[in-house]
Image (cartoon, helix red, strand yellow):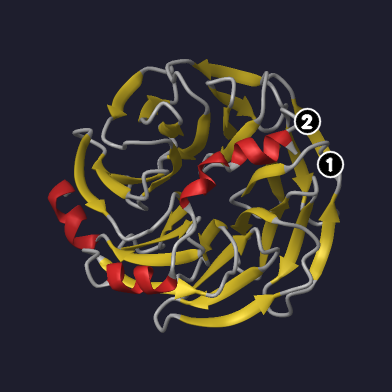
Amino acid sequence: MRKLFIFFAFLTHASVAAAQMNADETKADGLIRTFAGHNYWVVAVAFAPSGRNALSGGWDATLRLWDVAGGREVRTFTGHRSLVSSIAFTPDGRAALVGNADDTLSLVDMATGQEIRSFVGHRGMVTSVAVAPDGRTALSASYDNTLRLWDLATGREIRSFLGHDDTIWSVAISPDGRIAASGSSDNTVRLWDVATGTELQRFRGHVGWVRSVAFAPDGRTVLSGSEDLTAKLWDARNGIVLHTFFGHMDNVNAVAFAPDGRTVITGSDDGTLKLWDVAEGTELRTFTGHMGPVSSLAFAPDGHLVISGSIDMTLKLWNVSRSRQTAR
């Protein structure tokens, strides 16, 4: 329970009235709409591969599927047995892999809301999940300091990745499916050979827990967000820090690359999202509107939209295309 409390220590910011959120929405530059429906913290969001829908998961133990264009809640998946900590779509969009606070993963059918299968093996809350590009396997990260590789068709654990000295908060898989990146409370980013579970590289430079990691679309760089209030862009070949992104006033909880790799976006406990130019390492724009910490975010497949989830119990959809023109 102590780690559960630490995981969301920033949640003290979260008590917000709906009237306040609606009032601020009209002031938030770049904000398209707010999605309300969760009755507790929203901690995971993902765009479907088609870009037409988005999925959210929260500590109300529900998954919710949204129509992005209309802002309508398409379906609520109730009956989920645990608090949801992370989600990732399969490449065909027919299912989503869900990380749970009860130490398990669930593969959920998007058409029916039914659990296809469960994945058991971790000995601590599952904090992050990532599905391989070919849709055959997936990786999960956990409080138990391990990564685990799973066969999605059978639910079988293929192997464990050992080496981190503390909780692993985030995992990502390279576009070619061969390398995994992880971020941990031991302040490191590590790269792994997916086929063998061997640690390939260890990146040191953050002075706080690493909360989020992401691969560039070309796989050549890795982005990390940390409780040291920064994000860092690393050369995946040698671990050199190419840029450190300064600007957030609190922990950086979520990071993502635009599909074209020219920009990245970060979300923070300070309640803002920031868009950055990858080549220059400069801030392009700050998006305000959430009334609590930003816990998760994702780019739409076309790169024009970003969706964010927050401890204020909402999701917000942002237009980032105008800001990205300066990075072209």
Residue 14 percent location from the top left of the image: 49, 55
- Residue 157 image label: 1
Q: Secondary structure at mark 2?
A: strand
* Label 2 Cα neighbours within 10 Å, binned few <14 / some 14-19 / many ≥20: some
Residue nearest the viewer, comparing 221 with 209:
209
Q: Secondary structure at mark 1?
A: strand
Q: Residue at x 31, y 37 (%)?
A: 248
Question: Can see residue 178?
Answer: no
Residue nearest the viewer, comparing 165 with 256:
165
Q: Are marks 2 and 1 in contact (CB under 8 Å)?
A: yes
Task: Give left or right: position of 239 versus 281.
Answer: right
Question: Can see residue 190?
Answer: yes
* Label 1 Cα neighbours within 10 Å, binned few <14 / some 14-19 / many ≥20: some
Task: Give left or right: position of 128 versus 118.
Answer: left
Quarter of the image holding residue 57? Answer: bottom right
Residue 159 percent location from the top left of the image: 80, 33
At label 2, which amino acid type do we have?
A: Ser
Give the mark count: 2
Residue 217 percent location from the top left of the image: 41, 45
- Residue 197 image label: none
Task: Give left or right: position of 217 versus 85.
Answer: left
Image height of 13 relative to 157, above or below: below
At label 1, which amino acid type do we have?
A: Glu
Q: Residue at x 68, y 41 (%)?
A: 4
Residue nearest the viewer, comparing 301 with 204:
204
Quote the CA–CA distance across marks 2 and 1. Answer: 8 Å
Q: Residue at x 31, y 61 (%)?
A: 289
Residue 260 percent location from the top left of the image: 32, 51
Residue nearest the viewer, comparing 167 with 136:
167
The residue indicated by pointer 2 is 160
Give the quarter of the figure containing the N terminus.
top right
